[in-house]
């Protein structure tokens, strides 16, 4: 069996979909969680100065979506043909666009810029995306693409927790079909067991924000 390691901070965010896909695949992996103050030593040794990193038998790869897609293929969480895979990819990239827009606001350090960004984000951008995601989830019967469980559902479910913990944005409130996407991942027996071991808390997120000097989401 391949020796697998995942390196990320001690928080869900972009590391969590990778962890959850491995848990789903029944893979035992080394879950390396960098403590905030160790990051600056580790950063220069990583391929592009960022995490998550996925390691398999000593080979290391970066980029969370590429890793999710790779694990999705391994664990049959993909489409039935190239077009369906394109649909899954497009959804993942769109969800990533949304995350970046939200993150830009939450990590903004200038109070005046942040104040300017607030209304457009909460009144326009977030409703714009959520309305469309909810419609897609409805059309796909509680999934984000191709009417079945795929790796992009894992991306959404793992990030939804993080966004509501850190950004206080509840992606599922008033969006029953997005809630179904989330539940369809979280109800999987292996994932439930994982959350008994790693209950979702803000602790790791808070420590990371302090250690990296990033402002809190408040
Ligand atoms: N496109 C990359 C983005 C990775 C990324 O933004 N990583 C952040 C944490 S979520 C990071 O490593 N931040 C620390 C730093 O840049 O020093 C991916 O999806 O893997």
Image (spheres, rainbow, N blue to C red):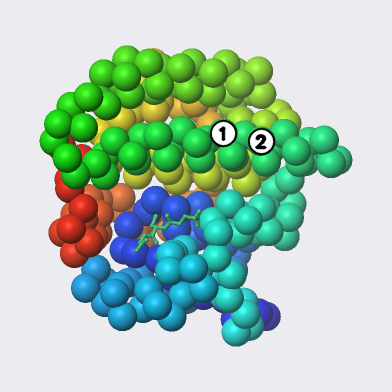
Q: Position of residue 135 (x, y in %)?
A: 57, 16
Which image quadrant for residue 37? Answer: bottom left
Per the model, the C-alpha gap separating discs 1 and 2 is 6 Å
Q: Residue at x 31, y 80 (%)?
A: 41
Q: Say which of 24 and 107 sits in front.
A: 107
- Farthest residue toward the right? 81
Q: Position of residue 35 (x, y in %)?
A: 26, 71
Element under disc 2: helix
Q: Position of residue 72 (x, y in %)?
A: 67, 53
Element under disc 1: helix
Rendered position, 45 above or below 96:
below
Q: Residue at x 60, y 84 (%)?
A: 58
- Quarter of the picture holding the C terminus: top left
Rendered position, 150 above or below 31:
above
Q: Position of residue 201 (x, y in %)?
A: 25, 51
The residue at which mark 1 appears reads as: 94
**Relative horizontal placement of residue 152, taking residue 198 as reference (left or right):** right
Circle 1 packing at 10 Å, graded few (<14), some (14-19), many (20+), is some
Q: Is residue 164 visible?
A: no
**Relative horizontal placement of residue 79, taking residue 203 as reference (left or right):** right
- Farthest residue toward the bottom? 58
Q: Residue at x 27, y 26 (%)?
A: 117
Q: Are marks 1 and 2 in contact (CB under 8 Å)?
A: yes
The residue at which mark 2 appears reads as: 90
């Amino acid at each position: 069996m391949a020796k697998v390691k995942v390196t990320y901070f001690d928080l869900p965010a972009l590391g969590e979909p990778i962890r959850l896909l491995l848990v789903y695949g029944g893979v035992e992996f080394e879950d390396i969680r960098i403590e905030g103050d160790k990051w600056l030593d580790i950063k220069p040794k990583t391929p592009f100065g960022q995490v998550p990193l996925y390691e398999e038998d000593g080979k290391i790869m970066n980029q969370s979506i590429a890793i999710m897609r790779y694990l999705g293929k391994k664990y049959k969480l993909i489409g039935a043909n190239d077009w369906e895979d394109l649909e899954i990819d497009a959804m993942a990239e769109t969800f990533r666009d949304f995350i970046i827009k939200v993150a830009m606001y939450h990590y903004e350090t200038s109070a005046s810029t942040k104040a300017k960004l607030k209304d457009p984000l909460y009144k326009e951008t977030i409703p714009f995306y959520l309305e469309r995601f909810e419609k897609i989830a409805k059309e796909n019967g509680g999934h984000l693409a191709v009417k079945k469980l795929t790796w992009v559902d894992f991306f959404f479910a793992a990030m939804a927790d993080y966004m509501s913990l850190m950004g206080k944005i509840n992606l599922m409130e008033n969006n029953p079909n997005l809630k179904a996407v989330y539940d369809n991942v979280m109800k999987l027996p292996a994932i439930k067991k994982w959350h008994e071991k790693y209950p979702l808390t803000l602790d790791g997120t808070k420590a990371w924000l302090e250690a990296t000097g990033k402002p809190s989401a408040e």
